[in-house]
Structure formats: structure tokens, C-alpha cells
Image (cartoon, helix red, strand yellow):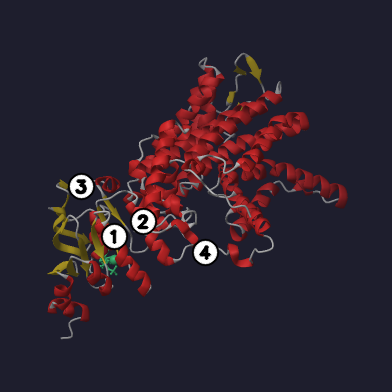
Amino acid sequence: MRIHFKRSYDEDIRLFEDWRRMAKYAVLLAVMIALPALVSAYFLGEVTLVLIYCIAGMGLMILAGHTGQISLGHAAFMAIGAFSNLWFMEQGMSFLLALPLSAVFTGLVGAIIALPILRLSGIYLAIATLALSIIIEDIAIIAEPFTGGVGGVFAPPVDVLGTSVDRYGSPNLFYWMCLSVVVIVLLGYANLLRSATGRSFLAVRDSEVSARALGVNVTRTKALAFGLSCAVTGIAGALYAHFVQVVNYESFLVLLSINLVLLVVIGGLGSIHGAFFGAVVVGLMPQFIAIARDFLQGSVGIDISAYPGLDTTVFAVIIIAMVIYEPLGIYGFYMKIKTQWQLFPLARRDMFRRSKSYLKTERMR
Amino acid sequence: MSLLSVENLAIHFGGVKAVDGISFDVQAGEVFTIVGPNGAGKSTIFNLISRFYQPTHGKIVFDGQDITRTPAHNIAELGIARTFQNIELFDHSTVLQNLLVGGHTKRRASWIEDVLHLPRSRANEREARHAVEEIIDFLDLAAYRDKMIAGLPYGVRKVVEIARALASDPRLILLDEPASGLSVEETADMAFWIEDMKKDLGLTVLMVEHDMSLVSAVSDRVLAVVEGKPLALGTSAEVQSDPRVIEAYLGTAA
Ligand SMILES: Nc1ncnc2c1ncn2[C@@H]1O[C@H](COP(=O)(O)OP(=O)(O)OP(=O)(O)O)[C@@H](O)[C@H]1O
Ligand SMILES: [Mg+2]
């Protein structure tokens, strides 16, 4: 096990603990940049979708993982991000301007919705946000001038600094664009977590009463977290719109909201890593299932494509297993393996025994 | 000069008069202790001063300023910090991170500066860490700095909670049963911490405590409260020998 001796406050503040860690992430980033040269165009498309899920996942993670407020309606904010982005572009705005603007718009809508909604907690908050996800389907049909009604909106061509970026026409460019957005959001998120603002989010998650006693304005903090969360999710929605190229009321169903919740839970609540792990699982699950299907059909001769709800069922089984056996998600599992490896052969079986925990914020009433 | 004065304070929860006409003044620099049997309303008085509860009657004045209607999240900035009877730490963070939240009121950077990690945000971080290191030193917590709260022994958590309160640089600190659940040695240590806070940091301490050894060791004045009403006020010895207090603790037999 490596022990890191700190010599200045800056060593605590900076993003990477030491150069090894920095090198690891640099290699990962280099591989991601070089990916178009390594994989097929089809697979690159799938990875692009995973990146979009990553952004949406980071959005929800800010809220659910770091502020402790559940939202079962985040697809609604993907929808707002998507429709507003397309609408801004139809008004003649360039994509580079429309993307941040749609993020700001979605964030503002989120913060405004948050003020009444976040007075609720636990199951009531879950129900209220779920309702949001259901309402958005109707709004997407009713608000025809903005959303194209039942038919939806076709995404106008994206033009970045004079170059056309199109999912089919220039898949590499589209992939790199999504990757850049992931990196930018990631940096902002990491900055947030090492600052007073990020700590106030964690404080609200772990104990609202002591947060208040220490001067944290809980209502404002929750609204800010919800707003930031929605802004990031809105960016994911906008990119998704350009990825699928046509969006309508059916593009952002409740199931997508549930998928986002699965993403953060499976990945590991309360860590940025979790958003990435979760996105890989949620984004690539249909592929895994397709591969498994072909394999089963080819080798054993069982045709499981006759069961249409299969991926949902697989998800359900995974999440139940996860909640029971690994509540900290894939990231928690990864940390366990890593610690055990570093301590080998000194690791003890009960080292990770879970301490009983429950929602603290419900206690002081 | 009295730093905190509470005038005729009362709060009723439905029919329960949890606090019913309490008045007292806490002088700057003293250790003022509230004692009383279970359910007497001691924690409720703290929750009123922290502004978690809105009093039904009465007035709370801190340093000449009426805070009876001040929002709870503005209390820390005025210079009142507190601990909780059932430790309320941020369990999934390290000791250092907990203390840093204690310095929340000192930050100057906005959330936008934080997200972009601009110079002011960075300067905030350095200053906050500097302030927190002094408290870690003061309360001897260096060994636990980077440990998660969830794995710490109970006695250490009690001290961490006090450290977190000190990190907001208060003038008045409210300690709700600082010695509950502590061993005899830990209680003796707690008495030293409280003395140090008073002498070295010049803090005023308002404390609720059942452990009479600690109460006698550190208190300048003691207020006994029973069923939300004040019963006796004086030095620790005076209050402990007051027949009404003894009766309240032992219960009225007749
Ligand atoms: N939020 C509330 N709603 C209703 N009743 C309350 C509330 N808070 C406190 N009470 C009641 O007020 C009374 C005083 O409670 P309080 O917690 O202040 O007692 P205490 O003196 O701190 O006792 P202990 O020594 O056990 O901590 C109790 O009867 C309690 O049930
Ligand atoms: Mg109490």
C-alpha cells in the first residue's frame, strides 16, 4: 500500500493525488481520443451513446449521489434540454451557442421546479419527480410550436466552427465532440466537489440539521444542486437529440428516467466514477443482451428474442442484486478489490462489513 | 455584558409545553450549564436558540441583536455554533471534510467560481484548511484527519463534532450533553477541552449536561429546568443542594 505524505494544502486541493494517478487518467483519455482508429464505426456509435449517458449520469449523480435527493423524472430534463437546444438552433443560433444556452435554460427550469418539489423528501419526492416525467410526455405534444407536437422535431445540421459535425456523415467528429463535453462537465464536477459548494451538497445529504446549524442555506443548496443537475442532464438531452436526429414525445419516456436511476445506483451512488461505470452498463446492456441472444441461438438453439421485455428484466435482476449485495455499486466493488489487492495478504473478511445506515434527514422531526 | 439573553421563552407542541417561560442571561466568557431530568426541555431550548423551532412566546437576543426571527442558516455567521445530543456528523466524509464544512460561513467565492476553480475559490480552500489545521491541533485530532467518520470510535466523534463547531469561529458554543456516552477518562478530557475553549479561545459556553462531575468542574453558573420551567439558578453547588431540584430529580413521592 502506498502512503502519500502531504506537504502543503495545495496537495490536498489539487485534482490528482500524485503523478501516477494523473498518468493513469492521461492514458485513459489518450485511448478514448484514439478510439475511432481502433474500433468499427458501429461500435463507435455505441460508445458515443455511452458518453451521452455519462453526461446524463453525472447530472443525476450530482443530485442523487452527492446531495441525496432522488429524482425519478430526469428524462424530463433531457427532453427540455433537447427541445430547447433544437428550438434555439431553429431561431438561427449556432450549435456552440445553443448548447450552453439550453443547459442554462434547463438549469433554470430545474431550479424553479425544485423549490416546491424539494420540500418533499423520501418517497414523496420520488413520486413528485416521477409525475414530472409523465407530464413531460403530454407537454411535448401540447407545446407544438416548440416541440413539433406528435411528429417531433428534426435536428438541424450541427456546424462547429465551419465544420459539419454529423453522427452519420462524420461519426468521428461527433464522437470527439461528445468526448469533449464529457471532459468539460467532468472537470466542472470535480472542481465542484473540492470546493465549499460541493461540500455543502454533501452536508445536506448527510445531515440537514447540522448543515443548517453551520450556516448552509439548505433550501438554496438543494435548488442549486437540482439546477446544476438539470443543466448537465439538459446537455445530455441536447446531444442525444443530435445523436438520434429526431425527437418527439416518445424519446424521453419514464423508462429513460428509470434507466438513469439504474445508472447511478448500479455505478455507485456518491462517486463520479459511478456515473461512468453505470453509463457503460446501461449504455451497452442492449449490446450484451444481443450478443447473449445470438450466442444462445447459435450454440444451444434457444431463441430468446421471443421475449420482448428481456432487457428490462435483466436490469431489474441486476438492480435487485446490487441493492442487496453491493449497495455502493460497481465503484464500491472496484474499491474493495483495489484495497484488497493493495493490502494483500493482510485483508480481512469483515473489513467491509456494512454499518447500519438509514436516511438521517428523516430523523430530526 | 450579557452575550446571550433569553426572555420568557416558550414553545408548545400541541398540548405539550416543552419550554414554558424560561429566562436567563449568559455573560460573555462564562460557562453556563442547563441541567434537568429527561424531557425537561433542555434540547428544545437549544433548538430554539439555533432557530430550528419558532418560539410560541418570548425573545432571544444575541450580542444586542434580536434573533427571534433570524433564519437558522444565518445563526452560524452571527457567531453561534452547536453540537447535537445524538452526534450529527457527515458520516460519509472524512474528519477534515467535516471540519471544512464548519468553515462554510467564511467562504467568499460563488458557486460559479467554485465550478471553474477560479483563484478566489482556490484562496478560500487554502484559508479554510489553514483555519481547520489550527483546530485539529487544538483538539489533538491529527491522527484522525483523513479518516472517515463512519469508522471512528464514539468518543472521537464527540470531539470531532466540537471541532466542527469551532471551525465556524463562534463566540458562543452550545454543547448538548458533551459527556453522554463517554468513559470517565474521556469525560475528564472533555472538562479540559471546555476549560481550554473558555480560557484559550475566549469562548462563551452554553451547555446541557447530566454528568454532575463535569457540570461541577467547569460551570460558572447552573440553571435547573423542570418540565419546561426554570427551577433554580446559581453555582453548581447551590443548585445541587436546592431542595426543589433534589425533589424534581427524585420525583415527588407524595
Ligand atoms: N418537535 C417536537 N414535537 C413534539 N414534541 C417535542 C418536539 N421536540 C421536543 N418535544 C417534547 O418536548 C419535551 C422536551 O424535550 P427535550 O428533547 O427538550 O428534552 P431534554 O430536556 O433535552 O431531555 P433529555 O435529557 O432526554 O435529552 C419532550 O416531552 C419532547 O417529547
Ligand atoms: Mg436533550
Please say whether residue A71 is visible from this viewpoint. Answer: no
Q: Earlier in the sequence, mark 3 or mark 2?
A: 3
Q: Is residue A52 above or below residue B244?
A: above
Disc 3 and disc 2 in contact, CB within 8 angstroms: no
Q: Is residue A248 or residue A8 the one in the foreground?
A: A8
Neighbourhood count class around disc 3 (C-alpha, 10 Å): few under 14, some 14–19, many 20 upward: few
Relative side of A306 to A119, left or right: right
Q: Amino acid at mark 4?
A: Ser
Q: CA distance from mark 1 to mark 3?
A: 32 Å
Q: CA distance from mark 1 to mark 2?
A: 9 Å
Tag 3, which chain? B
Q: Residue at x 70, y 25 (%)?
A: A171
Q: Is residue B5 above or below residue A226?
A: below
**Label 3, on which residue?**
B69
- Look at the image and tell me in which quarter the C terminus of chain B lies: bottom left
Q: In what element is the residue under mark 1? A: helix
Which quadrant of the render holds ligand 2? bottom left
Q: Amino acid at mark 1?
A: Asp
Neighbourhood count class around disc 4 (C-alpha, 10 Å): few under 14, some 14–19, many 20 upward: few
**Label 2, on which residue?**
B138
Q: In what element is the residue under mark 3? A: loop
Neighbourhood count class around disc 2 (C-alpha, 10 Å): few under 14, some 14–19, many 20 upward: some
Q: In what element is the residue under mark 2? A: helix
Q: Position of residue B197 (x, y in %)?
A: 28, 58
Q: Position of residue A55 (x, y in %)?
A: 57, 36
Relative side of A319 to B39, left or right: right
**Label 4, on which residue?**
A355
Q: CA distance from mark 1 to mark 4?
A: 34 Å
